[in-house]
Image (cartoon, rainbow, N blue to C red):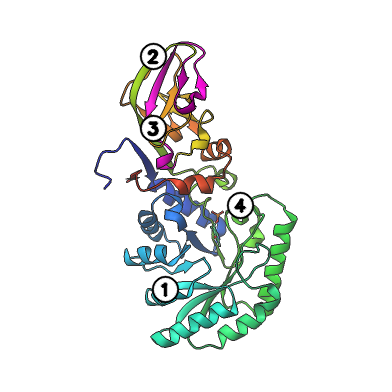
Amino acid sequence: MSHIPHPAWIEVDLVQFRRNLSLLKNRIGSCRFCLPIKANGYGHGLIPIAHAAQEAGVDFLAVSCLQEGLSVRTSGISLPILVFGGIHEEQIPLCIEHNLDLSVSSLLKAQLIATASEIMHKRCRVHLKIDTGMRRIGVRPSSALALHQWVSSNKFLEIIGIYSHLATSEQPDHPFAIAQIEQFQKLRQEIGPGYLWHLANSGGVAFYPNSYFDMVRPGLLAYGQFLGQHIHPDIRPCLTLKSKISYFKVVSPQEGIGYGHTYRTTAQSRIVTLSIGYGDGYLRALSNRGEVLLRGKRYPIVGNICMDQCMVNIGQGEAYVGDEVVLIGTQNTETISLEEVARQAGSIPHEILTLWNERLPRKYTP
Ligand SMILES: *Cc1c(COP(=O)(O)O)cnc(C)c1O
């Protein structure tokens, strides 16, 4: 569909993306690299990201659910694909059929997977999920040995990995993250190596080198966001959100703009309208807060963001209908970072990335 002209779009620089992956691989050394591509590859586009990652030599991909795993597998990806989420009984047969690695987060789930595998006469690759403090899915460390024993003695299940997830790793030196790493290390000593032990998300990779174990799973960082520069100055965002000016007008002082007139001009102003709104995933919370780049300068979003359009006050600045506008990313020497937008919207970078919908075409370079 991306050949149909549309006045708002996302540009993904796959050269920069592969550079990020290769810089991260240098950082982790001999440790394996699992790239999370859940939620449409963090908004960058599931299939193109999966293929770029496979070319760049990552070892594993991770998705959240069967639906994503199936799309990736049937697109011709041969890498192992781990499904992070707590699996539901009805999803298990298709996961096994398409060689997806499943997370075993309880004895009951292990039994369900084993039963389905037996019926299908096919072994299922699994990763045991231990809850060391996230309190989301996974067995308590005190039940890990028993789970390991049950699963390892079942001939329809093959343990590939054992993993856990950090709850507070986005801050360096956090005592809870340190405790989780120690807990995980202790379990590894009890159960033994011989599996892929994996724990580190982006925060782990950036701030906790002793969380690497046998494999790391950095998401946001791999897309060059947030903690990237902390590791290497050349790890950079690979995504730009753009739109175009659809309309230009001059508005007198003291006039209200948009629904509810939440903004009033103070002086005679040039107001331009952009073809993007909250219906595309550009959050309404950015109304009267967000900024955009136009001809290399920053200008404010004024009034409430509409479903499909929004307005920008360019004061006495210059702009023409058809001009390209950057909402997230760099234009000339100015940058609006994803972090900045997330802060203005009262959100986090992960959420902003995953709200953009199908209406916004993705354009890939090269
Ligand atoms: C999403 C996710 C990650 C990646 O998290 P980032 O913060 O993007 O690095 C790693 N592991 C699990 C289990 C996840 O769900």
Q: Is residue 255 above or below residue 182?
A: above
Q: Nearer the viewer, residue 309 or 54?
A: 309
User: Is disc 2 placed on a helix, strand or loop?
Assistant: strand
Instruction: Name the mark nearer the viewer: 4 or 3.
Output: 3
Asked which quadrant contains residue 175, the reply is bottom right
In the image: residue 60, left or right of residue 8:
right
Rendering quadrant holding ligand 1 = bottom right
Q: Residue furthest right?
A: 175
* Disc marking residue 218: none
Q: Residue at x 73, y 62 (%)?
A: 179
Magenta includes 275?
yes
Residue kind at label 4, given as amino acid type: Ala
User: Is disc 1 placed on a helix, strand or loop?
Assistant: helix
For disc 3, the marked residue is 309
Q: Residue at x 39, y 32 (%)?
A: 309
Q: Is residue 239 above or below residue 84?
A: above
Asked which quadrant contains residue 27, the reply is bottom right
Q: Earlier in the sequence, mark 2 or mark 4?
A: 4
Q: CA distance from mark 1 to mark 4?
A: 32 Å
Q: Where does the magenta region start and end?
A: 255-281
